Image: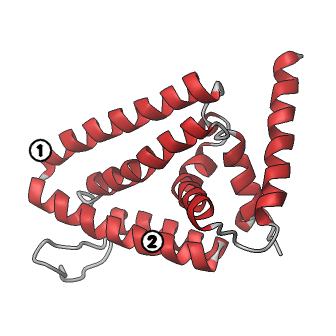
Amino acid sequence: MGRSGLFDLERHFAFYGAYHNNPINIVIHTLFVWPIFFSSLILLYFTPPLLKAPEIGFNHGLIFNYGFLFALIYAVFYVVLDKKAGSLAALLILFCWVGASVVASKLGFSEAWKAVLAAQLLCWTGQFIGHGVFEKRAPALLDNLLQAFLMAPFFVLLEVLQTIFGYEPYPGFHTSVKARIDAEIKEWQDKKLS
């Protein structure tokens, strides 16, 4: 049922899950990952347009720029990984892009970067505390930066969907992922001891 390579959801989820196994760290990430994504979109609002298209929507100027491209890449990747949860993630990403565009256009660059800096500092500090104090393991981004950044919002969403609704992309997904997470954690612990 699973895919291989770049679109292997089990592999991505197990990689990320091996670094986020402590329940308190998971809650911290649940609270802070999406605000990091949202505030990044606020900053990316100020990049130049990629297309010569008229501004659309709400008189706040939704601009097809790097913020839009960033959001589009995440949305498409998540839908390819899992159509149901990926579609929900894509919808959340759309709301984030629109919301970030509205906030950025209202604040202007001189105020927006300050708000983004404060949000990023707060959220990243919380996550590093989650790893240092509760997980007692360095963040995933130190081992695979691209995978950690790309999977973080989707990992959090899948965790919430699984916890609240028992959702899994296909039958046996969580059992298989749990086995892979346990194996990765054991391998990491064995390396620490040697």
Figure check: 88 above or below 17: below
Please identify the quadrant where the N terminus is shown: bottom right
State the residue in front, 75 or 27: 27
Residue that numbered label 2 is attached to: 72
The spot of residue 154 in percent (x, y) is: 56, 60
Q: Tell me if 143 is positioned left or right of 30 in this view.
A: right
Q: Is residue 124 above or below residue 80?
A: above
Residue in front for this viewpoint, 143 or 169: 169
- Which residue was labeled with disc 1? 110
Marking on residue 190: none
In the image, what residue occupies the spot 55% across and 36% down?
Answer: 24
C-beta proximity under 8 Å, tags 1 and 2: no
Which badge, 1 or 2, comes first in the chain's sequence?
A: 2
Cα distance, mark 1 to mark 2? 26 Å
Q: Name the residue rendered at 89%, 16% in the picture.
A: 194
Task: Judge the density around disc 1: few (<14), some (14-19), many (≥20) Cα neighbours within 10 Å.
Answer: few
Q: Amino acid at mark 1?
A: Ser
